[in-house]
Image: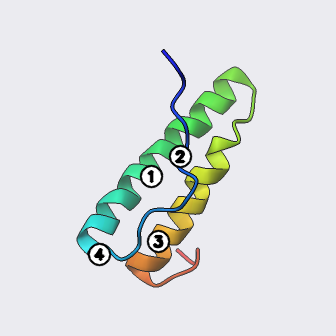
Amino acid sequence: MARPKCADEAPDLSQSKEILGRLLKIELERLDTAVQIEKDRKIVFPETSIIIRDIQKLNEAVNGTKGEE
């Protein structure tokens, strides 16, 4: 099975805050998983940076913050 490809663009931020909040929760869970895999395998995945980018954009759209939380 081929490895999934990351999205080239951040999520569409014109959706409702409810949907964006759900996406934010999913991305935070993905980040936890990605970091754990990186630690276990002692490698760094470039995709982790994409997850972080998406979290930052979603957090700003949902909470109006740029990483202060």
To which quarter of the image does residue 23 belong?
bottom left
Asked if labels 2 and 1 touch by Cβ distance under 8 angstroms, the answer is yes
What residue is at 30 percent from the left and 59 percent from the top?
Answer: 22
Query: Where residue 17 is drawn, which disc sits there?
Result: 4
Query: Where residue 27 is drawn, which disc sits there?
Result: 1
Q: Position of residue 64 (x, y in %)?
A: 46, 85
Amino acid type of disc 2? Answer: Leu
Nearer the N terminus, badge 3 or badge 4? 4
CA separation in Å, label 3 and label 4 = 10 Å
Number of marks: 4
Element class at badge 2: helix
Q: Circle 3 sits on which residue?
A: 59
Q: Circle 2 sits on which residue?
A: 31
CA separation in Å, label 1 and label 3 = 10 Å
In the image, is 54 to the left or to the right of 16? right
Nearer the N terminus, badge 3 or badge 2? 2
CA separation in Å, label 1 and label 4 = 15 Å
In the image, is 45 to the left or to the right of 6? right
Amino acid type of disc 3? Answer: Asn
Q: Position of residue 19 (x, y in %)?
A: 27, 65
CA separation in Å, label 4 and label 2 = 20 Å
In the image, is 17 to the left or to the right of 49? left
